[in-house]
Every structure is written in structure tokens, then in C-alpha cells.
Image (tube, grey):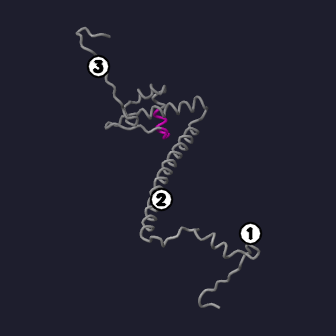
Amino acid sequence: MARRDGARRIRTETRIDADRGVFMISVAAELADMHPQTLRMYEARGLIRPQRSPKNTRLYSQADVERLQRIQAMTNDEGLNLAGVETVLEMEATVERMRADMARMEKRAAQMQKRMTEELERLRGSLGGEMVPYGAYRAELGAKTAAPGGADAEARPVRVTVRKPGKS
């Protein structure tokens, strides 16, 4: 619609944090295509946790509305009852916690690996040529301890008795 005074309309777009409670119960119910009493029941069952205003009014976020729509899809389209919905949502929350735990563990493992590499480099620098990589003498040791009959012969098990000091 054009304005008669020649002034232009300015359109502004605002991004709202998806977790910020901005919708009152009637608006959230309409957006989710549900009755407001259904939202109250879902809150009582713990399926949804709206924020509260200073005057204790329920405030639903965009994420809450999307969750309500998912709940409705699970009950209407998938045929789940509310107990099934609770189980699915709990399992999804558990998976998310596990993913976060894995990410933390992977980050910690990478930090530990980095520290170990740095310490190994520091030791190599301080020891110079004295440090020999594990397994460097395997081929040489294998040739010295080869069983009679050549290097291809099978090694035989050897029994070694170890006595503790002071006991005979």
C-alpha cells in the first residue's frame, strides 16, 4: 500500500532467539494448532517447560512451539500415546547428552595427545641420540634368539620360575 505523503515504508526484520519465550499460551496454541488446555496438560506431564514472565504468565519460545508440533505429529501421525512420546523425547535427550559427552571426551583426548606429543619431543631434545624407538632392536634380537633350525623355526615356550626374595 503506497503512502500518500510520499514517504517510503521501511521494513525491518528482527531475529528472535529460538529459546526466548515470547508467545503467550493462546498464541503458542494457535501456532501449534492445539487447544491452550492441551499445552497446560503437556506442561503438567513435563513434555514442555515454558518460561514464565515476572507475573507468572507462561511464555513459549519458537523452540517450544516446534516441540509442540513434533509432539502432535508423534501422536496424530505416528500413533504414539503420550507415554510413548515421553519415552522418545527422553531417549532423544539422552542421545544429545551422550553426543555432548563424546565431544568433550574427544576434545580432552586431543588435548592429551597434544601434550604427550609435546612431552615426547621435549624428551627427544633433551636425551638426544640416547632414546631409541620401541621395536628398533626387534629384528636384531630375533636373529640372536632364533631357535635351532634357522630363523623360520617356531619358538618353543620357556617356563621361568621367579622366586620372591627371602623365600626358598
User: Which class describes the residues within 10 Å of circle 1: few (<14), some (14-19), or many (20+)?
Assistant: few
* Residue 87 in the image, given as x and y percentages of width and height: 57, 42
Kindly check if marks 2 and 1 are in contact, taking CB atoms under 8 A apart as contact: no
Q: Residues within 10 Å of mark 2 (few under 14, many from 20)?
A: few
Magenta segment range?
39-47
Asked if residue 41 lies in the magenta stretch, the reply is yes
Q: CA distance from mark 2 to mark 1?
A: 38 Å
Q: Earlier in the sequence, mark 2 or mark 1?
A: 2
Residue 48 image offset from top left, x and y in percent: 46, 38
Seen from the viewer's position, the closer of residues 84 and 2 is 2
Question: Which secondary structure is most common in the magenta stretch?
Answer: helix
Residue 152 drawn at (x, y percent) = 74, 69
Q: Secondary structure at mark 2?
A: helix
* Cα separation between marks 1 and 3: 87 Å
Amino acid carrying label 1: it is Asp
**Is 97 one of the magenta-colored residues?**
no
Of badges 1 and 3, the one in the foreground is 1
The residue identified by callout 2 is: 113
- Among all residues in the image, which is located at the extreme right? 149
Mark 1 and mark 3 lie on one chain; the one further toward the N terminus is 3
Asked if 44 appears above or below 72 in the picture, the reply is below
Residue on which disc 3 sits: 10
Of the image marks 2 and 3, the number of the one nearer the N terminus: 3
Give how far apart the Cα atoms at labels 2 and 3 are. Answer: 55 Å
Identify the image quadrant of residue 157: bottom right
Disc 3 is placed on an element classified as loop
Amino acid found under the numbered disc labelled 2: Gln
| In this picture, residue 150 sits left or right of residue 2 | right
Mark 2 and mark 3 in contact? Answer it, CB < 8 Å.
Answer: no
